[in-house]
DNA sequence: GTCACGATTTGT
DNA sequence: CAAATCGTGACG
């Protein structure tokens, strides 16, 4: 197992902190992947757009589990969207991966390109072929912050983070 | 059981 | 701007 794989403690932090830290790191499945360029945070509290807002259900179970796992859901019946579970176990924060360098921009496009499907839901990003590696940050990169895309509720919150070179 | 609704993408 | 497409959660 590569020494560059992000450890569990990386994910066991506040959701926004994890979201910002995720930018620039390398996401891969079976060795294929690239740097994460765009993410969105979905908060464990006060965030009506988050799936966990309605509480603990069969679907959101993964969000309440240990950090560093993948939460994959099907958007609009067609597009698998990949999220990274953050916060200590029991606190349902997560980060949506919206763009990966070289594999597409848009949460549904990058999953299709990398072959990520619903069957990857719940996979451990620390010990499985679906993982995130620490990547040295190039100089002169900054983070742009904007509202999240495609949601109606809690739409004003500044929770989308884009890596700007 | 039934039904309305999307954390999207693509084509008109 | 509208269609495609189906798992989920609310309701009864």
Image (tube, coloured by chain):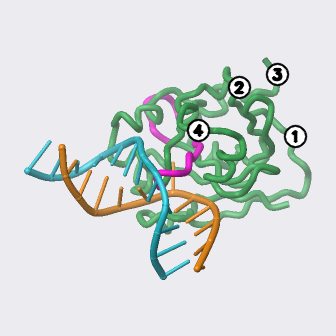
Chain colours: A green, B orange, C cyan
Q: Which mark is residue A136?
A: 1
**Foreground residue, A90 or A122?**
A122
From the viewer's perspective, is B6 left or right of A123? left
**Foreground residue, B12 or A12?**
B12
| Residue position marked by numbered label 4 in the rendering | A117
Q: Which residues are magenta?
A: A76-93
Mark 2 or 1: the one toward you: 2
- For disc 2, the chain is A
Mark 3 or 2: the one toward you: 2
- Residue in the picture at 74% in, 39% down: A27
Are the residues flagged by discs 3 and 4 from a single subunit?
yes
Are the residues flagged by discs 3 and 2 from a single subunit?
yes
Mark 4 or 1: the one toward you: 4
State the image coordinates of residue A127 (x, y, percent, origin top left): 67, 20
| Residue position marked by numbered label 3 in the rendering | A3
From the viewer's perspective, is A156 left or right of A115? left
Sequence-wise first label, 3 or 4: 3
3D distance between C-alphas at marks 4 and 1: 28 Å
Quarter the N terminus of chain A occupies = top right
- For disc 3, the chain is A
Q: Secondary structure at mark 1?
A: loop
Sequence-wise first label, 3 or 1: 3
| Residue position marked by numbered label 2 in the rendering | A129
């Amino acid at each position: 197992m590569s020494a560059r794989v992000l450890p569990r403690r990386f994910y066991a932090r506040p959701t926004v902190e994890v979201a910002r830290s995720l930018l620039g790191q390398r996401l891969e499945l079976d060795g294929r992947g690239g740097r994460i360029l765009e993410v969105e945070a979905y908060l464990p509290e006060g965030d009506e757009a988050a799936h966990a807002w309605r509480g603990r259900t069969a679907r959101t179970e993964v969000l309440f589990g240990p950090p560093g796992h993948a939460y994959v859901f099907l958007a609009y019946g067609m597009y698998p969207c990949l999220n990274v579970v953050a916060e200590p176990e029991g606190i349902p924060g997560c980060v949506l991966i919206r763009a990966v360098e070289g594999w597409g921009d848009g949460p549904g496009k990058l999953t299709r390109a990398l072959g990520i499907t619903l069957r990857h839901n719940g996979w451990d990003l620390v010990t499985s072929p679906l993982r995130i590696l620490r990547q040295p940050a190039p100089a002169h990169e900054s983070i742009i912050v904007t509202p999240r895309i495609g949601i109606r509720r809690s739409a004003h919150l500044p929770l989308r983070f884009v890596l700007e070179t």
